[in-house]
């Protein structure tokens, strides 16, 4: 076991304050589970997929390494007024918290 502690600057949801957030406003979100779903909702599936790809590129650039995505889930919501498609990227919680960044910073100090 290592004695080197890595300090993370997390918000109330346990995410790094520097983590890029999805660009789709209130329709897209990062949810709270161990492998956190990052959700992209839209009536147009290509638009939801494009935003998820854009966010994934932004997040990987921020993290400095590939983001650990365990699964991609596609669902739909046929309730009136709700966006029809829901694309979820199930992402590693430590990556979203910025742990690899903090570890690299601590190692370079």
Image (cartoon, rainbow, N blue to C red):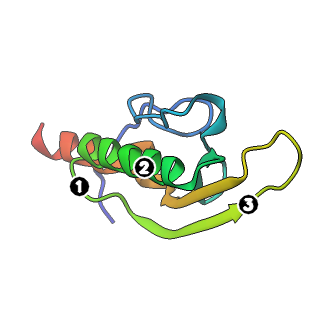
Give the quadrant of residue 80: top right
- SS under mark 1: loop
Classify residue 37 as left or right of residue 23: right
Nearest the viewer among 71 and 52 is 52
Between residue 78 and residue 64, name the one nearer to us: 78
3 vs 31, nearest the viewer: 31
Q: On the picture, is 4 further left or further right than 95? A: left
Q: Position of residue 57 (x, y in %)?
A: 30, 48
Image point 56% across, 40% down: which residue?
Answer: 14
**Residue drawn 66% across the image and 47% down it:** 43
Mark nearest the camera among 2 and 1 is 2
Q: Which residue is mark 2?
A: 50
Q: Which mark is residue 76?
A: 3
Mark closer to the chain start, 3 or 1: 1
Task: Say whether marks 2 and 1 touch (CB < 8 Å).
Answer: no
CA–CA distance in space, label 3 to label 2: 17 Å
- First-in-chain label (3 vs 2): 2
Residue at horizontal 21%, vertical 41%?
106
Q: Quadrant of the N terminus?
A: bottom left
Q: Are marks 3 and 2 in contact (CB under 8 Å)?
A: no
């Amino acid at each position: 076991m290592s004695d080197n502690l890595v300090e993370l600057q997390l918000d109330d949801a346990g995410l790094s304050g520097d983590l890029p957030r999805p660009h789709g406003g209130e329709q897209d979100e990062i949810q709270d589970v161990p492998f956190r779903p990052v959700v992209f909702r839209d009536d147009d599936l290509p638009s939801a997929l494009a935003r998820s790809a854009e966010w994934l590129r932004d997040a990987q650039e921020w993290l400095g390494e590939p983001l650990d995505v365990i699964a991609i889930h596609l669902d739909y919501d046929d309730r009136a007024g709700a966006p029809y498609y829901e694309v979820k990227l199930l992402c590693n919680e430590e990556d979203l918290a910025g742990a690899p960044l903090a570890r690299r910073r601590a190692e370079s100090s």
